[in-house]
Image (tube, helix red, strand yellow):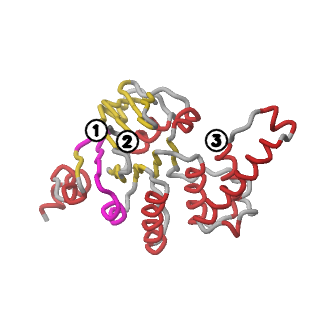
């Protein structure tokens, strides 16, 4: 059974149809790409999956731990609790908090103590807080940020802010990770390192990943399957080799004249 099943997802804003009858499936452990020209509706799909928008039509089903959860119309925090985490095209960190606190906050949804225990600093609270601190530092080690744990997030270089955002998403312990243009603004060396990192965290954390990215070298290298959007509609899906040669994809990206030339 698919981890994520999306059926006929539709969203419009006024007279603009942003996403129209989009259906897709992600199996457990897959790394799948979602590509398309600017304005094709990719980030809108992410916002629908993450609960930023409610769909006009369609269903979104997450199957995890042997149970099906309907995500359409759910609030973002409930979707996160269900096991879906995301990063953003434009980085959205808690800029005035430390690197460490950005990750620690994300982990609090999984703590095993109540309000009374926290208020009275009971042993259960102290035990969970120690565990939370250790795990937060481990995520920072993975992203090579542990030496900057006390710096404000806004003071990190751009590439390290990207890594911190991924660390924060991982800290929620998701089953499905949505990466929205993680290589945006990176140079080729940084992109190559990010490619290896995505492959590693997928294996290490046994994640299913849906990736939006304009860097086709990254997409073609790491994605097993690719969905292609154009004007809010799916025009193709398949393996990287199939997508490379699909005439609809060539037309959407290059135009027939360029392809003929």
Is tag 3's residue or tag 1's residue first in the polypeptide sequence? 3
Closer to the camera, 123 or 102? 123
**Tags 2 and 1 in contact by the CB under 8 Å rule?**
yes
Is tag 3's residue or tag 2's residue first in the polypeptide sequence? 2
Q: Estimate the spatial distance between the alpha carbons at disc 3 and disc 1, rounded to whole Å.
A: 36 Å
Q: Residue at x 72, y 55 (%)?
A: 133
**For residue 233, which numbered disc appears in the image?**
1
* Mark 3 burial class by Cα count in 10 Å: few <14, some 14-19, many 20+: few
Q: Is residue 9 magenta?
A: no
Q: Residue at x 49, y 64 (%)?
A: 185
Q: Which residue was labeled with disc 3?
A: 110
Closer to the camera, 48 or 32? 32
Query: Height in image: 144 above or below 31?
Result: below
* Mark 2 burial class by Cα count in 10 Å: few <14, some 14-19, many 20+: many
**Tags 3 and 2 in contact by the CB under 8 Å rule?**
no
* Quadrant in which residue 218 is drawn: bottom left
Q: Left or right: where does residue 14 sit relative to residue 117?
A: left
Of badges 3 and 1, the one in the foreground is: 3
Q: Secondary structure at mark 1?
A: strand
Closer to the camera, 188 or 81? 81
Q: Position of residue 31 (x, y in %)?
A: 37, 53
**For residue 41, which numbered disc appears in the image?**
2
* Quadrant in which residue 40 is drawn: top left
Q: Secondary structure at mark 3?
A: helix
Q: Secondary structure at mark 2?
A: loop
Range drawn in magenta: 216-235
* Mark 1 burial class by Cα count in 10 Å: few <14, some 14-19, many 20+: many
Count up the numbered dots.
3
């Amino acid at each position: 059974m698919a981890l994520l099943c999306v059926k006929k997802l539709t969203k419009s804003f006024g007279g603009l149809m942003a996403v129209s009858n989009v259906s897709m499936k992600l199996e457990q452990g897959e790394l799948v790409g979602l590509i398309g020209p600017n304005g094709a509706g990719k980030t809108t799909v992410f916002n629908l999956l993450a609960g930023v928008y409610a769909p006009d039509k369609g269903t979104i089903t997450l199957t995890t731990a042997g149970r099906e959860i309907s995500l359409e119309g759910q609030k973002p925090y409930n979707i996160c609790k269900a096991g879906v985490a995301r990063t953003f095209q434009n980085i959205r960190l808690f800029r005035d908090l430390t690197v460490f606190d950005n990750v620690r906050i994300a982990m609090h949804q999984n703590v095993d103590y109540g309000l009374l225990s926290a208020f009275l600093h009971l042993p259960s609270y102290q035990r969970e807080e120690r565990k939370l601190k250790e795990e937060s530092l481990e995520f920072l080690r993975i992203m090579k940020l542990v030496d900057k744990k006390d710096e404000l997030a806004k003071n990190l270089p751009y590439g390290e802010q990207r890594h911190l955002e991924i660390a924060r998403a991982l800290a929620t312990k998701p089953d499905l990770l949505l990466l929205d243009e993680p290589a945006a603004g990176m140079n080729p060396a940084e992109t190559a390192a990010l490619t290896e990192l995505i492959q590693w965290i997928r294996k290490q954390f046994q994640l299913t990943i849906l990736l939006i990215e304009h860097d086709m070298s990254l997409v073609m290298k790491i994605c097993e399957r690719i969905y292609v959007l154009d004007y809010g509609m799916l025009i193709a899906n398949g393996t990287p080799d199939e997508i490379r040669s699909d005439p609809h994809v060539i037309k959407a990206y290059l135009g027939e004249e360029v392809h003929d030339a």
